[in-house]
Amino acid sequence: MSFFKSSKKAEDVKQGGSNHITSSGLYPVVILAPIVSVSKNGSTSIDMYVDHKGQKQVIYGNLRITNNDESENKIGSKIFNQLLIISGKDEVTDPIETELPIGKKEAMKEVAVLEDLADVPVLMRVQMEYSVYKGNIQEKKVIKGFFRESDNASAEEIVNESEVGLAFEKEMKYVDNVTYKDDLTPETIQSWIAGGRKEGLPSGSSAGSSSEPAKKPAFGKRRFGADKE
């Protein structure tokens, strides 16, 4: 009895699979457009519309630049600053409104983007984070940092003109890390993914509930310098 028969169909011999970013890792991407949004509570966040090996996608990394009270968010600002340094930018101008094919079935959607950071090749580290809200598992891609695509240089190495690549080597120790909150375990998440990421918790899970929901960017809701004195 045959165990496995080869296939010469185009879909079966095509090299590679989906290039959607769905796991922790360090990815070579081209940032097509950083998308700026302001939440209903007033915080400003930036999400990355990127191209990873021909697959265009939005990384909702919750890169928060300001808090609800408009004060600087130190963590998000630091990571975003890395992007500016490795891109060779001293500053970027205010967002402009445009349309991108990021809606359902790639429908055009109006967003505010930073055109000064369009078409920038970088290495982007993403760390998956899992939590629970109202009995459902929340999956989030958290942007942890950027490196220069051409030589793996960090922002600090560029500014200090120090030896390139040392920070990159240190970062590789953490590149596969995953954050599990609310008593979630790797086994629970594996079961949830295998089951098609359905609502609710996998059978037998004792994970609790997080205190805050995962916030989605409010596209187009902008509050920038134009409306301030």
Image (tube, rainbow, N blue to C red):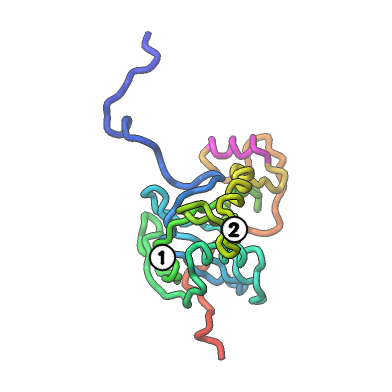
Q: Residues within 10 Å of mark 2 (few under 14, many from 20)?
A: few
Q: Would you name the residue on which mark 1 appears?
A: 118
The picture quadrant where one finds residue 2 is top left
The residue type indicated by label 1 comes to: Ala
Q: Nearer the viewer, residue 95 or 218?
A: 95
- Residue 126 locus on image (x, y percent): 56, 51
Please tell me the numbered disc located at residue 80: none
In the picture provided, is 18 more to the left or to the right than 146? left
**Residue at image coords 67%, 45%:** 180
Q: Quadrant of the N terminus?
A: top left
Q: Amino acid at mark 2?
A: Ser
- Magenta residues span 185-195
Residue 227 visible in the displayed image: yes
How far apart are labels 2 and 1 at the CA level? 27 Å
Q: Position of residue 52 (x, y in %)?
A: 42, 50
Q: What residue occupies the far left of the structure in this picture?
A: 9
Determine if the magenta segment contains residue 101: no
Helix, strand or loop at label 2? It is loop
Q: Is residue 194 above or below residue 37?
A: above
Residue that appears at 54% across and 56% down: 146
Relative depth, front residue between 77 and 219: 77
Asked if marks 2 and 1 touch (Cβ < 8 Å), the reply is no
Q: Which residue is mark 2?
A: 162
Residue 137 seen by the camera:
no
Left or right, 82 with reference to 122: right
- How many numbered marks have been drawn onto this rendered protein structure? 2
**Percent position (x, y) of residue 78?**
62, 65
Question: Which of marks 1 and 2 precedes in the sequence?
Answer: 1
Dominant secondary structure of the residues highlighted in magenta in the image = helix
Residue under the point 51% across and 74% down: 91
**Element marked by disc 1:** loop
